[in-house]
Image: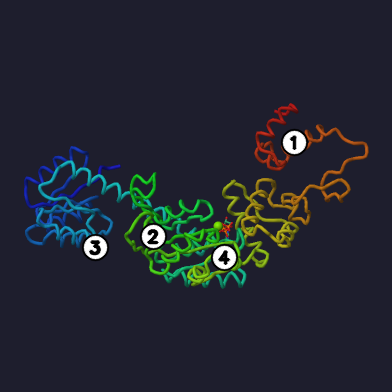
């Protein structure tokens, strides 16, 4: 990596000289300009990574130079150099996008620290922007499979709500129906896309912790509060907060959230000051909020505030035509992940997938496809690789008891009996054969961990 290049602009020769001597010793490359015109010229020809800019210059002054630089490159950090009497101008410069300022007479170490800090922050910002742009397409509406009319309707509402950048959204639907995916898509297709998306699960934390996570706290608010800490509301400013499992939020915090939704302001824990932020709230739940309201566990007024735009995600069993497109979508995903190249599912397997009622919804379908890809060989996923519950058996739900009908396909005990260890050994050998001696996949086929499989292989002298 080339060393960062700094453009130093000051009309005093001694200042230019001492700054560039000092910064070069720190390993930076420096170019200097003594007036605004020269500064803008060098800015274009040298492409510096940072500008140190005196406010008071002959000809076009520092503020104008700053404006032109920021127009050309809004991301470049500019550190202003001011006389102590120019503080108001310095503040104006900050408003125009200057990164920070140092007052004359300055301390060289202070300048070094600020330069280093500005360069690091800018690099981090660029990395984040790069990461976001690379992932944006995977996070938007295009990644959501929605063929059936009900999902088309869901997406069209979601698209509209994404554009209206502050509207609160309530997503409801059974577990695994895609609430997370949709919340993210709304954020990444909204004008807030380049600001943070911050998910938080309301079940995962005790009430007080959740409150300080969301609202932050003041130094001394409680024993461990050694210094003031910002909460998600502040950190997500300009972005979106995703309150997952909102149904589990405790009433005390519900009131605070309600207040926030009403006037977009809140107080840190232990704080007196009202803090205003601009965030969109997307809430989600798989619980029956109406029942929670009847049982007085959820505030009715909060429910109405949250459901400005309610979106209901249908369970997979009501979206039968989406089952195969989703299955093929996941097949592609896992082909890529496991470097396999299955072309599809056999007709019989497709029929089972379509007929099953998917209580765990899309997440369950995804897991079934993952398991099938691991267990299968050949070009197609056949019924063998599908779990019993999908093929109409109940085995997954419980163990068959003596006297009950055996499931088709489960081993039948011959009348003359067997040596159970011999059967175990034989099954292990077959699993290894079927998977081309791949122990991880063989273990999956037998419902064992790889270690448990290796233990048995050792026992049967198969290693
Ligand atoms: N329409 C869709 N297209 C493609 N993948 C989807 C779709 N909906 C959900 N998925 C995938 O299904 C899985 C479950 O989705 P998600 O986590 O969004 O469900 P959820 O409703 O938030 O569940 P929970 O209530 O348990 O939190 C994820 O792996 C997600 O990527
Ligand atoms: Mg979720």
Q: Position of residue 140 (x, y in %)?
A: 48, 62
Mark 3 = which residue? 71
Q: Quadrant of ligand 2?
A: bottom right
Residue at x-position 90% and y-position 40%? 414
Mark 1 = which residue? 428
Label 1 close to label 3 by CB (< 8 Å): no
What is the CA distance from the residue labelled 1 to the residue labelled 3? 68 Å
For the residue carrying disc 4, how many other residues have a C-alpha within 10 Å: few (<14), some (14-19), or many (20+)?
A: few
Q: Which label lies toward us, 2 or 4?
A: 4
Mark 4 = which residue? 296
What is the CA distance from the residue labelled 2 to the residue labelled 3? 19 Å
Q: Nearer the viewer, residue 10 or 349?
A: 10
Q: Nearer the viewer, residue 207 or 146?
A: 207
What is the CA distance from the residue labelled 3 to the residue labelled 4? 55 Å
Q: Earlier in the sequence, mark 2 or mark 3?
A: 3
Mark 2 = which residue? 194
């Amino acid at each position: 990596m080339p060393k960062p290049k700094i453009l130093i602009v000051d009309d005093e020769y001694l200042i230019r000289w001492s700054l560039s001597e000092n910064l070069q010793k720190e390993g930076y490359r420096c170019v200097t300009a003594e007036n605004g015109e020269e500064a803008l010229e060098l800015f274009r020809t040298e492409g510096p990574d940072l500008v140190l800019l005196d406010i008071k210059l002959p000809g076009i002054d520092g503020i104008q130079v700053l404006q032109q630089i920021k127009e050309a490159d809004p991301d470049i950090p500019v550190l202003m150099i001011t006389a102590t009497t120019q503080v108001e101008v310095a503040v104006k410069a900050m408003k125009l996008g200057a990164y920070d300022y140092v007052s004359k007479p300055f301390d060289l170490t202070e300048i070094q620290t600020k330069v280093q800090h500005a360069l690091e922050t800018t690099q981090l910002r660029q990395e984040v922007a790069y990461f976001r742009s690379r992932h944006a397409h995977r996070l938007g509406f295009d990644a959501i499979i929605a063929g059936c009319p009900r999902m088309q309707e869901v997406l069209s509402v979601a698209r509209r709500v994404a554009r209206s950048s502050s509207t609160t959204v309530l997503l409801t639907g059974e577990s695994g129906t895609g609430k997370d995916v949709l919340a993210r898509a709304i954020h990444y297709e909204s004008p807030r896309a380049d600001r943070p998306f911050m998910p938080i699960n309301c079940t995962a934390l005790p009430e007080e912790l959740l409150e300080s996570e969301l609202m932050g706290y003041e130094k001394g608010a409680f024993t461990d509060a050694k210094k003031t800490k910002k909460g998600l509301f502040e950190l997500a400013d300009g972005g979106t907060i995703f309150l997952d499992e909102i149904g589990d939020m405790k009433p005390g915090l519900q009131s605070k959230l309600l207040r926030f939704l009403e006037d977009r302001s809140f107080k840190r824990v232990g704080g007196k000051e009202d803090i205003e932020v601009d965030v969109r709230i997307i809430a989600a739940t798989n619980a029956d909020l109406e029942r929670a309201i009847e049982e007085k566990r959820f505030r009715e007024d909060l429910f109405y505030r949250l459901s400005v735009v309610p979106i209901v995600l249908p369970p997979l069993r009501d979206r039968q035509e989406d089952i195969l497109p989703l299955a093929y979508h996941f097949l592609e995903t896992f082909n890529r992940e496991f470097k396999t190249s299955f072309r599809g599912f056999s007709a019989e397997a497709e029929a089972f997938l379509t007929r099953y009622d998917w209580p765990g919804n899309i997440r369950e379908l995804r897991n079934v496809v993952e398991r099938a890809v691991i267990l299968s060989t050949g070009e197609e996923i056949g019924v063998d690789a599908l779990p019993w519950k999908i093929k109409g058996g109940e085995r997954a739900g419980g163990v068959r008891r003596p006297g009950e009908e055996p499931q088709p396909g489960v081993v039948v005990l011959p009348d003359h009996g067997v040596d159970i260890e011999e059967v175990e050994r034989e099954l292990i050998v077959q699993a290894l054969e079927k998977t081309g001696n791949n122990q991880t996949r063989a273990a999956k086929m037998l419902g064992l961990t790889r270690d448990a499989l290796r233990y048995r292989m050792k026992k049967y002298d198969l290693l």
